[in-house]
Amino acid sequence: DLQLSGPIPSQLGILINLQILKIGDNGLTGPIPASFGNLDNLIILGLASCSLSGHIPPELGKLGQLQYLILQDNQLDGPIPAELGNCSSLAVFTAALNNLNGSIPAELGSLQNLQTLNLANNTLSGEIPAQLGEMSQLVYLNLLGNQLQGGIPKSLANLQNLQTLDLSANKLSGGIPAEFGNMGLINYLVLSSNKIGRAHV
């Protein structure tokens, strides 16, 4: 199949009236241009299922209008920028199926409009930040297939709109918070393949 290939031109960052940029499902390579941080009116950035590499640019944190940040199924590495916590309009952030590492930034907890957070199948480590329990609109939280450690934060029980929680295939330990009984809308709760409930070796 013929696909678009090569790097994303940084010159696209000059298109300051751009609201939607969807160029996923192609053979694009190289980094996400830092110049995209200049696209003040951008609402949707769709870059899924390419072969993009390098880090997520911290400059994307300047996009106050951005609602959809779709980065899954690439070869992105490095940390998740704490600056993304400034994308106050963000409703969907998915970066699953990459090689992202480091810890999940506590700053994501300030995304009061976020409904979907999917960071599955990366190499994220450290503890799940308690601040994620502050994302009051969150419906879908998927962190499966990482290397997250420590306990499950009781604060996640504050997510009264949460319907899906998947923390499976990590290195979590300790108990399942009794507070989870307060999450009345949840219909998919998966904690398989962790160390939960086992004594520390």
Image (cartoon, grey):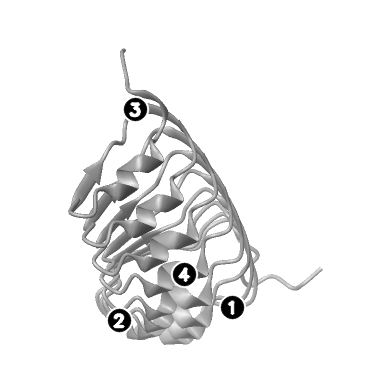
Q: Residues within 10 Å of mark 1 (few under 14, many from 20)?
A: few
- On the rendered image, what quadrant is the N terminus found in? top left
Q: Secondary structure at mark 1?
A: loop
Residue placed at 43% from the left, 46% from the top?
33
Q: Residues within 10 Å of mark 2 (few under 14, many from 20)?
A: many
Q: Residues within 10 Å of mark 4 (few under 14, many from 20)?
A: some
Q: CA distance from mark 2 to mark 3?
A: 34 Å
The residue to which callout 4 is attached is 83
Give the label, 4 or 3, closer to the camera. 4
The residue to which callout 3 is attached is 26
Give the label, 1 or 3, closer to the camera. 3
The residue to which callout 1 is attached is 175
Q: Earlier in the sequence, mark 4 or mark 3?
A: 3
Q: Secondary structure at mark 4?
A: helix
Q: CA distance from mark 1 to mark 3?
A: 43 Å
Q: CA distance from mark 2 to mark 4?
A: 19 Å
What amino acid is at disc 3? Asn
Q: Earlier in the sequence, mark 4 or mark 1?
A: 4
Name the quadrant containing residue 164.
Answer: bottom left
Give the label, 4 or 1, closer to the camera. 4
CB-based contact (under 8 Å), mark 1 and mark 3: no
Residue 91 visible in image: yes
Where residue 166 is drawn, which disc sits there? Answer: none
Q: CA distance from mark 4 to mark 1?
A: 32 Å
Name the quadrant containing residue 194.
Answer: bottom right
Residue placed at 21% from the left, 58% from the top?
43
Question: Residue 154 vs residue 101: left or right?
Answer: left
Residue placed at 32% from the left, 55% from the top?
69
What amino acid is at disc 1? Gly
Q: Secondary structure at mark 3?
A: loop
The residue to which callout 2 is attached is 136
